[in-house]
Image (cartoon, rainbow, N blue to C red):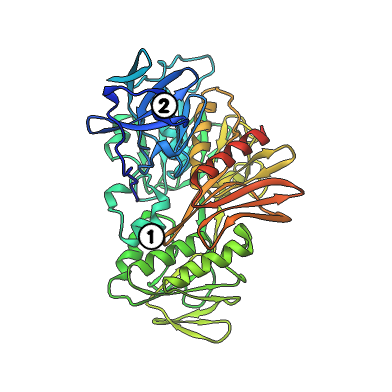
Amino acid sequence: MTVHESQDAGPDLTEGVTLAAFHGRPMLRGHVGDQAVLLARVGDEVLAAGATCTHYGGPLERGMIEGETVRCPLHHACFSLRTGEALTAPAFDSIGCWRVERVADRFFVREAVEATPRRAHTVSPGEPGSIVIVGGGAAGFAAAEMLRRRGWQGRLTLLSADADAPCDRPNLSKDYLAGNAAEEWIPLRPDDFYAAHHIELRLSTTVAHIDTKTRTVLTAQGSRHSYERLLLAMGAEPVRLAIPGADLPHVFTLRSLADSRAIIARTAGAKSAVVLGSGFIGLETAAALTARGLAVHVISLDARPLQRVLGARLGDFIRKVHEDHGETFHMGTSMTSIGARTVTLSNGLQIDADLVIIGVGVKPRTGLAEAAGLAIDRGVVVNEYLETSQPGIFAAGDIARWPLAPGDTARVEHWVVAERQGQVAAGNMLGAREPYRDVPFFWSAHHDVTIRYVGHAPAWNEVVVDGDIAARDCAVSYRRDGRTLAVATIGRDAQALEQARQLRVQDS
């Protein structure tokens, strides 16, 4: 986890500033005592709010104002400038707010004001008295948190197959695995959050059956949970290959906190590691293990890393970044067997391997939904409100296939997408009827290079590079028939935000 702090504390806002201090920009970072405060121009008003994103500490003054909200430049969390509320994931905690007083041509920041809570929830006809959420990942947690934040007081049950409470999964292949993030940073909320908010969290619980007629969820452990609304958020599971030796104790997949802990424990005394797969998880894991001092080899059937998502030029650049940090790539080949201390490749090469990570992708956990009779099409089919073919049952996250644009559907395995779908599903389970219209976004860290990607481009026929990839200053657009579907940026955080805004307008 990286916390970004501004080098310049800026002016003391209690002494007042004029509009000239903004230098034509919409935001100004300053301070009130030892607290960083953001001044934002919203129409004829100047509003004051916390200057630091509550997710990973991003500097909000480098973000973007949209209406009365500000978006973080790092991971695109969105906050209300008027109330401080974290409106969209990945942030859940609000930022502070201060009263601003205008005296002549100067704006003075006065006392802090209490965050404005959402209006007390009013029970409406047909609102559910009980909700069950299956899945303790991004979508499941975000939905549960939002239900309580909206003031809904019904019975809320969160069933999770994981042994640990909902955690910051992106960190499991990044800073946590590399040894740069303490474990206390990883839970999305402390253990007492669930009891305090009357969320019945059941860990290590596998749902075995959904009875849609009686509206009951049955678990493999024998418990029964009735629901009036049900959210399916089971996520995806790592693809496991039938390679001789794949069941050896030093061979891992990476999906849960328990997986990451086990890999870290195995690195003690290890000197070499082999990662099968050159996708995002494989490469992030390779970078983390390299940071721990292991000699890392990456094996992949692909011609170049990440080519299917980022194209040839960006894929070649990312490979060089990893190679410059000491990793060795074996492209166009795969493993045929895994031994106690080596792996054998399909080209006959043997490589030392004290540790093996299988990172060849994931598949959505759709079996439960399919057995319940829900419509399936390479995922659980949902409408624009994230409701499945069975009224009262919703789906979000990695399993959900939703209408991305007219005539086009998508199923996206991104953390922020899952969280935001969970938040929208929460409102819709209460009758909000809010269509999910968010633009997909993810970020991926490769040593000292971070890629931010907005949009969704499963196929394209044109790639346009603006800037210099090698100089780590670029925006790469993926287009089909002249229409921009997605943009990947390096070193251009503000442009990534603007591209996301343009895509929202384009697809609205």
Q: Secondary structure at mark 1?
A: helix
Residue 293 horizontal/vertical position (percent) = 33, 72
Residue type (three-letter) at the residue carrying disc 2: Ala
Crowd tier of the residue under label 1, counting other residues whose Cα lies within 10 Å: few below 14, some 14–19, many 20 or above: some
- Residue located 41% across and 20% down the image: 118
- Please state the total of marks drawn on the protein image: 2
Q: Which mark is residue 350?
A: none
* Residue 382 visible somewhere in the drawing: yes
Work out whether residue 362 or residue 174 is closer to the camera in this orientation and state it.
174
Q: Secondary structure at mark 2?
A: helix
* Residue 83 visible somewhere in the drawing: no
- Residue located 45% across and 83% down the image: 351
Residue type (three-letter) at the residue carrying disc 1: Asp
Give the quarter of the figure containing the C terminus.
top right
- The answer to whether 109 is drawn above or below residue 156 in the figure is above
Image quadrant where residue 314 sits: bottom right
Q: Which residue is mark 1?
A: 259
- Residue located 42% across and 65% down the image: 287
Residue 437 in the figure: left or right of residue 326: right
Q: Which residue is mark 2?
A: 20
Residue 257 horizontal/vertical position (percent) = 36, 54
Residue 301 horizontal/vertical position (percent) = 60, 72
Work out whether residue 96 or residue 64 is closer to the camera in this orientation and state it.
64
